[in-house]
Image (tube, rainbow, N blue to C red):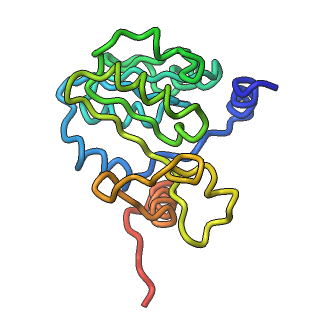
């Protein structure tokens, strides 16, 4: 079974990936500011939630994924909106090379880079960015207590070389993010703390 077949089956079963939580959207707004029509490419967009969040910030977004089912689901869930487009494209098989150079102000790779050949994918992303453009990577980070298997797919793992410098990192607490998502789903607006 190919990777595309695996993900097509995953999405056919109605499964998603990790939902985009409010703290993550807040970080996008804080670090990117208003999109003001700037062009963004969301690589590995899945069912389009992250693309939609960028669009809501004012970016003109193209989301790409190699799963036909994910792209169809993204188009269906996000509807037809000016400045929000989804395309079938395999970034790990040279698909990014089909896009015009210097086209995007922002390229996002949310929970995507650990699954592809890192060096050519990042090199191609660089070619697609305008001068001064940004590449935003969201990926799992290995904590000291994480099992070895989970550390192997994290940025900065032994097969990836050095970790990113602290100035290039923004770490969030997944448990807190997941808690926010659960509270929003229940219709509540606050998370209390226990003493």
Describe residue 114's horizontal placement relative to residue 100 as left or right. right
| The N terminus lies in quadrant | top right
**Residue closest to the far right:** 1
**Residue drawn at x 34%, y 55% as measured from the top left:** 165
Count the labels in the image: 0
From the top left corner, tell me how far across and down residue 157 is, in percent. 56, 53
Figure quadrant of residue 16? top right
From the top left corner, tell me how far across and down residue 54 is, in percent. 33, 34
**Residue closest to the far bottom:** 195
From the top left corner, tell me how far across and down residue 11 is, in percent. 68, 31
Describe residue 154's horizontal placement relative to residue 134 as left or right. right
Name the foreground residue: 117 vs 192.
Answer: 117
59 relative to 72, above or below: below
From the top left corner, tell me how far across and down residue 153 is, in percent. 61, 49
190 relative to 36, above or below: below
Describe residue 181's horizontal placement relative to residue 28 as left or right. right
**Residue drawn at x 52%, y 30% as measured from the top left:** 44
Figure quadrant of residue 124? top left
**Residue drawn at x 53%, y 67% as measured from the top left:** 143
């Amino acid at each position: 079974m190919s990777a595309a077949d695996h993900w097509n089956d995953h999405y056919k079963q109605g499964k998603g990936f990790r939902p985009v939580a409010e703290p993550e959207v807040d970080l996008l707004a804080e670090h990117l500011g208003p999109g003001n029509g700037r062009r963004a490419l969301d690589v590995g967009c899945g069912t389009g939630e992250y693309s939609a969040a960028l669009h809501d910030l004012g970016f003109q977004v193209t989301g790409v994924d190699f799963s036909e089912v994910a792209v169809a689901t993204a188009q269906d869930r996000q509807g037809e909106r000016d400045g929000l487009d989804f395309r079938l494209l395999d970034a790990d098989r040279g698909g990014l090379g089909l896009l015009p150079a210097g086209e995007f102000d922002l390229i996002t790779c949310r929970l995507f880079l650990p699954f592809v050949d890192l060096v050519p994918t990042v090199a191609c992303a660089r070619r697609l960015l305008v001068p001064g453009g940004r590449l935003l990577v969201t990926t799992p980070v290995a904590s000291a207590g994480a099992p070895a298997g989970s550390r192997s797919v994290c940025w900065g793992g032994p097969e990836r070389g050095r970790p990113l410098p602290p100035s290039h990192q923004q770490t969030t607490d997944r448990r807190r993010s997941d808690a926010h998502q659960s509270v929003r789903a229940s219709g509540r607006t606050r998370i209390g703390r226990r003493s």
